[in-house]
Image: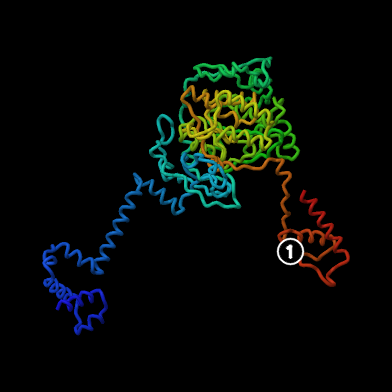
Amino acid sequence: MTGKSLGFRTGSYGSLQQQQSNGVLQNHATSLLVRKNSKLLLSNYREKERLLPYLCRCLCRMRVGMAILFSFAVLAFLWGFFTVNKAPGGSGSDIDDGLQHGRYKIWGVTNHLASVFPGKEDSQKDDSSHIQNYSEVSAEKMTHIQIPASTKPVMVSPVFGGYNSLDHPCKSFALPPPPPPNRKRIGPRPCPVCYIPDEQAVASMPGSPSRSPLLHNLTYVHEETPIEFEPHGGSDFGGYPSLKQRNDSFDIKESMVVHCGFVKGSAPGQGSGFDIDEADLAELGQFHDVIVASAIFGNYDVIQQPSNVSEAARTHVPFYMFIDEETEKYMKNVSVLDGSKRVGLWKIIVVHNVPYKDARRNGKVPKLLLHRLFPNVRYSIWIDGKLKLVVDPYQVLERFLWRQNATFAISRHYRRFDVFEEAEANKAAGKYDNGTIDYQIDFYRKEGLTHYSEAKLPITSDVPEGCVILREHIPITNLFTCLWFNEVDRFTSRDQLSFSTVRDKIMSKVNWGINMFLDCERRNFVIQAYHRELLEHMRPPALPVTVRDQPPPRTPSMVVRDNTARRNPGRKTPAKRGRDRRSGSKHHRKVSVGNRDTNSF
């Protein structure tokens, strides 16, 4: 009987035919009954089992019980998953869901120090850096990912005029992992940046100036006949500050008088060596909350037109482009500049009597001394002449200044973090005279300059990518750019070499810092073009081919044009043979090639 009961136990998981082979077709209830009887014949250990464990084992052996348990497990997992990922208030989860399903377009995200801090030697390679592995796409083609205006209401702080940090739409975003490396696309690339809509960015502008630590009153040296008392002391335009005056300028006080260019003349731009027309000076003196400025000297770059500029910025944010007489002459010759002195959004400011022979050094004057040229401006965005701005100015300032409660922002170099390495790279690339670079670095080393290391954290880099500067015009930032300019005037024009020295000396005296954001984030809102010299040596593009549905009858003159079109690289001309060859065809081909080259240039 025991063997027969064990046979039925096996049959409960088997097929119907196995149960019929025992001479009887049993239903589910009979099977349970037989198992119950077999249980009564087991040992005392089985008879002492409790009812609840026994029922659980029976249910687990049944397919229905397994299905029920599996269903409960799936429901519990889903409930826990949505509970953990649900953002407070619900709106945050809506944003995340929209991002995952492509409903929202976002350029990016917040800055994470851990993802970009330089490690050992391998971390400095272009193809191994976390930041440099992003897909190489131009900012024009890059997906504009932007928080919809309806996602979050504008919450204006009564003090700063911006978002409450706990309610900012971009607070939940993090830098996504980089795509896999691509051998065809190496080097620095843009990465995502989270911007809020332009109307909300305008509303987040602080209502009052930021506090300037310790320094409240900053004035500048004026001297009509500056005298150079020391070698490597600077220039007439900078006033030849002595080493003692240089060192004293780093001793921050409530009121200070420092050298800051424009030492001669009645005012900056008037007999100072960087002279500007009276009408333009009057315009530069007007009040503006935000300006965008750039410069092209020595006809070195091609002017780039900003894009994606909001109506508010077009109305209230002026764009100023400083050029010298050489660049002005070229722009007039090619009919780019007319009597209105406007090229697209840019208002052209012509500079006369430039102070330096080096065009790049002349460009440092508006780059670092904008507060002297624009005495009544609150915020400024500086971009080098080779760059094209592709994000609204208000959005850029909100992301890198106002959201961070910063007064000065600049991107760090995409690869180098150490001044000594930057100096060697400049020497290898022939950026400046090697002896002058060595003199500057030796001078800084004697002052205490050391290699960059983790000991400098939270400072993330000693080398900036100085082609973009975002700043609020307050005394401490004005002092910083003045002293930075004095270093450029005294030593080399490579401002990356002197940046950290000036920054660290000021930070050692007052509680002030600089927002050094990622270089890939900078590449998100500006596109870098080639210098004019490189563009002129590039291969000209092929002429477009005009396709006609029904071409007119051929004539000898039209054969030349037709051959020109057929020799376009995009189309292949079948070889002529037999009687199709004409005695003058070879001559015609030579003429067509000559015409093509002439038209290309």
Q: Quadrant of the N terminus?
A: bottom left
Disc tally is 1
Label 1 Cα crowd, 10 Å radius (few <14 / some 14-19 / many 20+): few
Above or below 29: residue 110: above
At horizontal 63% and vertical 18% (from top left) the residue drawn is: 241
Residue 226 locus on image (x, y percent):
67, 16
The quadrant holding residue 66 is bottom left
Q: Is residue 469 left or right of residue 103?
A: right
Residue 472 locus on image (x, y percent):
52, 29
Out of 149 and 365, give the one closest to the viewer. 365
Out of 107 and 320, give the one closest to the viewer. 107
Q: Secondary structure at mark 1?
A: loop
Residue under pointer 1: 572
Q: Is residue 601 left or right of residue 474?
A: right
- Residue lying farthest to the bottom in this orientation: 23
Out of 176 and 333, give the one closest to the viewer. 176
The quadrant holding residue 159 is top left
Q: Is residue 310 visible?
A: no
At horizontal 78% and vertical 65% (from top left) the residue drawn is: 552
Above or below 45: residue 319: above
- Residue lying farthest to the right in this orientation: 583
